[in-house]
Image (tube, rainbow, N blue to C red):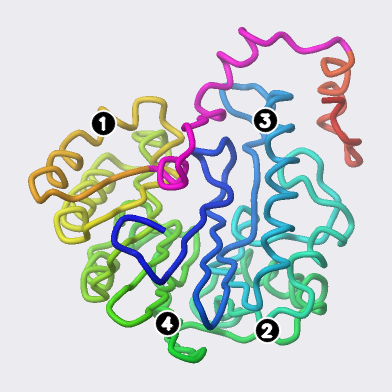
């Protein structure tokens, strides 16, 4: 517990600064423990390379960390149905490190699952994933409830969810997400995954209106500039992020922003805005008191500095198949 939170304990479990794609976080309070977005993934190809064995070792370890944290929680959230934000029930040893359902059962069994509405403000792909979750991992839950725009009380704790907001820019086809706020007295921890900056000014306005003490926020996807995201959208995301760091005492900046190796200098103006107000910006690893471990953005360097075994090299030749065995790591 730090950075202005005395009664709400926030423990980042997996994130880009831990070496994977995730924003999974455990929030402990006197009246309820909440596991936020219990998913974790690897990028299947970056720089035309599959994940390095060190990345597989990392996701394997963090999968176990998330499962152990799930034992402490009574509530689990799903902000949206991308697989780095919830755990699927099919076997996949390349992207999600999942088996045929035991991993999901560990996380969702007997939990109250508060999730993005599977019918409203959702695209076809995510609607299908939501339906699959309800039939698989969700069947182990105590209950699964659409949380968009709702507030839930647990003793003195309020757990509030925003309306559905854009996954990035307002015209994005990547779906919608819901943000969560845990409130205890005057303390408010806000969780804003995949808002990508936010690149939506409406989303930025909702964040500022919530007046969080600490926010964990998915930053702009700098690594996609000029490729899948227009420069003007990124610029808007940076400007909105400047507004937020000037107003919120502590911003835990994560996810898409950290997939660019040069994220820190590219966001220098954001750091300057925070510094001018005496506010803090940190990664999830830094918030947890750990060293940053950026693996995806350093994948080329990993393959150079840590040559893979011949067995692993042969395994990579199976990656175009339909059934892929666990990598030899």
Please tell me whether residue 42 belongs to the stretch shown in magenta: no
Q: Residue at x 30, y 55 (%)?
A: 199
Quarter of the image where one finds residue 81: bottom right
Q: Residue furthest left?
A: 276
Which callout, 1 or 4, points to the residue nearer the camera? 4
Q: Is residue 57 left or right of residue 221?
A: right
Q: Which label number is shown at residue 160?
A: 4
C-alpha distance separating marks 1 and 2: 40 Å
C-alpha distance separating marks 2 and 3: 32 Å
Magenta stretch, residue numbers = 283-310
Q: Which is more toward the observer, 21 or 29?
A: 29
Q: Is residue 126 left or right of residue 91?
A: left
> How many discs appear?
4
Crowding near pointer 3: few (<14 within 10 Å), some, many (20+)? many
Is mark 1 in CB contact (under 8 Å) with mark 3? no
**SS at circle 3:** helix
C-alpha distance separating marks 2 and 4: 16 Å
Q: Earlier in the sequence, mark 1 or mark 2?
A: 2
Q: Which label number is shown at residue 55?
A: 3
Q: Which is more toward the observer, 190 or 126?
A: 190
Q: Which label number is shown at residue 266?
A: 1
Q: Quadrant of the N terminus?
A: bottom left
Crowding near pointer 1: few (<14 within 10 Å), some, many (20+)? some
Is mark 2 in CB contact (under 8 Å) with mark 4? no
Crowding near pointer 2: few (<14 within 10 Å), some, many (20+)? some
Residue 246, position in %: x, y?
A: 14, 55
Which callout, 2 or 4, points to the residue nearer the camera? 4
Q: Quadrant of the C terminus?
A: top right
Residue 55, position in %: x, y?
A: 67, 30
Please tell me whether residue 307 belongs to the stretch shown in magenta: yes
Which callout, 1 or 3, points to the residue nearer the camera? 3
């Amino acid at each position: 517990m730090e950075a202005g939170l005395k009664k709400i304990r926030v423990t980042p479990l997996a994130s880009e600064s831990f070496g994977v794609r995730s924003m999974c976080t455990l929030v402990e309070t006197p009246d309820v423990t909440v596991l936020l977005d219990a998913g974790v993934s690897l990028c299947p190809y970056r720089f035309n390379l599959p994940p390095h064995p060190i990345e597989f070792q990392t996701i394997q370890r963090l999968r176990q960390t998330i499962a152990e944290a799930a034992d402490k929680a009574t509530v689990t959230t799903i902000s949206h149905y991308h697989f780095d934000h919830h755990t699927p029930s099919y076997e996949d040893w390349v992207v999600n490190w999942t088996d045929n359902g035991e991993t999901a059962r560990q996380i969702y069994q007997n939990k109250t699952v508060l999730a993005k509405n599977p019918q409203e403000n959702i695209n076809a792909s995510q609607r299908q994933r939501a339906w699959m979750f309800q039939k698989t991992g969700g069947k182990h839950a105590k209950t699964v409830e659409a949380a968009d725009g709702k507030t839930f009380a647990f003793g003195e704790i309020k757990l509030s969810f925003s309306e559905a907001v854009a996954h990035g820019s307002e015209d994005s086809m990547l779906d919608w997400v819901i943000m969560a706020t845990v409130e205890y007295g005057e303390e408010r921890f806000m969780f804003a995954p995949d808002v990508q900056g936010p690149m939506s000014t409406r989303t930025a306005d909702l964040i500022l209106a919530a007046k969080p003490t600490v926010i964990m926020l998915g930053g702009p996807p700098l690594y996609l500039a000029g490729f899948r995201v227009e420069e003007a959208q990124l610029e808007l995301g940076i400007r909105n992020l400047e507004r937020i760091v000037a107003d919120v005492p502590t911003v835990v900046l994560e996810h898409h922003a950290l997939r660019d190796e040069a994220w820190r200098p590219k966001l220098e103006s954001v750091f300057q805005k925070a510094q001018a107000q005496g506010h803090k910006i940190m990664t999830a690893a830094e918030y947890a008191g750990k060293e940053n471990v950026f693996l995806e953005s350093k994948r080329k360097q990993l393959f150079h500095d840590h040559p893979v075994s011949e067995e692993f090299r042969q395994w990579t030749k199976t990656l175009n198949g339909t059934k892929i065995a666990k990598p030899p790591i």
